[in-house]
Every structure is written in structure tokens, then in C-alpha cells.
Image (spheres, helix red, strand yellow):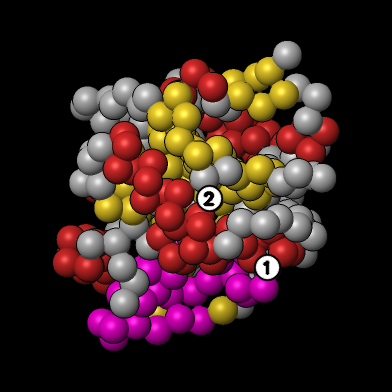
Amino acid sequence: MADALGLGPSPARGESSNLSLPTASMEFKYFSKNGKILPTAEAVIPLSNIEYQYGFGVYENVRVQSGIPYFLDDHIQRLVESARAIGLTHSFSEVNIKKSIAELIKKNGDGTYNLKVLLIGGKESALYIVCLNPLFPDKKLYTEGADFVTYEYERPFPHAKTLNMLQSYLAYKNAKETDCYDALLINGKGCITEGTRTNFLLLRGRTLVSAPESEILLGVTRKAVLKVAKENGFSLEERELRFSDIINSDGAFVTSTSSKIVPVRSIDGHALATAPDALRELMELFEEFLQNYKGKLT
């Protein structure tokens, strides 16, 4: 018996009023398994796979635009680092993973979509790469800002993007039930660290304030945003983020592969200053960067 990988949007994401499908969804006929291109109909994982059942795997979501995978080297490096962090041994080199991705993009064609890269552990580790139609934020969120809730949860391996997603799923589900964009996680010290699928930053003047990097997933989009910010006169400060710091800031925003930069409008019903001039400037600078650098961080 086998279970499909899930090549469409999950119900929780599809039901959200904050997210929408692109105007023209693509049909993907192929996926990659261990470097071999196969028909999508064969994209299955046995239900007896104990590693998949228990979440012993890591993954990455890569944005593809006009056939170009954005920040691919950084995503692959993080995938490999995530595997190392949880003791997942495998035989896939960064070069081979990159080659498999290039071959799959060529087979499925140009377009705008996401690649989900799954590296599953076990006696025989497996690498699955599937194409998914992305769900982008509603455009009004970029001007009006998004609402968030908080949820008490501290991920056990902050730097690893793992398949062990139960608590994050419950937090995200709670956000959707209250018509919020995402849930912000609160650690044992009562500080906000990150979202379930986003990185979170404050803005004070031209200073970006982040939770300590040792306590969060180092997002690839976050890395790109910080690069753009540094090159344009912004600075970065790392420290614990308490709710009082957030309420008294000049604004806040989240970053992710699909959302890029989305301003925060409220947290747990408390309104924040939405999108000051400095944040608008950073959003415009980041859009320019994405257009000019075509998926490269250098």
C-alpha cells in the first residue's frame, strides 16, 4: 500500500482567505526520485515507511520563476545542513541534488511554481523532488498588513527544516481558524522567535531587530532581505523579542519564499504601526533585487 506525496495545495492552505492560487495553475507530469525522472502518478511513499511516519526527514521549498530556481545553492546547503543536524545520513551530494532539480525543471517546463525537495532518512535514504502550484498572499496584505496570533512552542532543532511538523501545524491551524496569516512562536522565556513558516523581524528606524539566530530557522529569503538591507544603509540587531518590544516598535514584518516581505498589522488583536516608510523602501528594494539578480544571492 502506498500514499501519494500530496502534489496539490493542502486543505488548510487552500481554505485560507489570506492566500490565493496563481491565475493559471500548471499541471506537472513528472517528479524526481533519487535522481530519476518519473511520471507524477508514481510519486508515492509506502505507508510502512517508519521514517516518513515519524517525520525523520528534512525538506526545502524552492521558488521557480520563468524556469529559474531562486537561491538554489542556499536552499540545497540548508537541506544538507538540516540533515546533518538531525543525524540523517544519505548519499546525495549537493551537486547531484542540483542536477536533479535542473533536470526536473527542464522536463516540466518554464513557469512560476514551487519545488518541494524531500530528503527522507532510513536504511535507504530517498530524495523526492516535486513541483507544486504556489499559494501567494492576497495582494492587499502588502499594503494593509497581515494579522497574526501567538502560540507557545519551541522547535527542538531550530536550524533544521524537518518533517516533524505537528506543533507547527497545530499553531498554523489555530491561526487559520482565527483568519490570521500565520502564528508566531513563543519560546520558554516568553519571547517571540519566528512564524510557523515565516521569519519575523522588527523595525526601529533603519535597524532590523531579530530574535537570536541561534534560536530560529535561518530562512533563505530572510538572508536575501538582510543582504539587500545591509547594502542600503540598514543594520541588524539580534536580541530576545518580548511583546512590549514589538508593540513599541516602528513596525514588523515577516519573510518567506512565497510571501517575500509582508508587513504585520496586528498580533493577538494588538495593532502595530503598519509599514513605515523605511519598510516600504525595503520592500521596493527587495523587489528590484529579485528582478535584477535572477535568483542569485551574489
What is the x, y in percent for residue 150? 62, 46
Q: Label 1 is placed on what type of residue?
A: Glu
Q: Crowding near pointer 1: few (<14 within 10 Å), some, many (20+)?
A: some
* Mark 2: amino acid: Glu
Work out whether 51 lies above or below 4: below
Element assignment for label 2? strand
Q: What element carries label 1?
A: helix
Q: Residue 285 location in percent, x, y?
A: 21, 68
Give the magenta part as a residue range: 208-237
Q: In this figure, which residue is indicated by the disc labeled 1?
A: 215
Query: Which of the numbered marks, if any, corresponds to residue 60?
Result: 2
Front disc: 1 or 2: 2
44 left or right of 224 in image: right
Going 26% across and 37% down the picture, which residue do you hit? 109
For residue 172, which quarter of the picture? Answer: top right
Res 28 visible: yes
Q: Residue 218 in the image: x percent, y percent? A: 55, 66
Label 2, residues with CA under 10 Å away: few <14, some 14-19, many ≥20: many
Is residue 43 rendered to the left or right of residue 29? right
* Residue located 36% across and 68% down the image: 225
Q: Which of 292 and 137 is in front in this view?
A: 292
Closer-to-camera residue (24/192): 24
Identify whether 285 is placed above or below 188: below
Q: Residue at x 39, y 74 (%)?
A: 226
Identify the residue at horizontal 31%, vertical 34% (top origin). 108
**Mark closer to the chain start, 1 or 2:** 2
Q: Does the magenta stretch include residue 79?
A: no
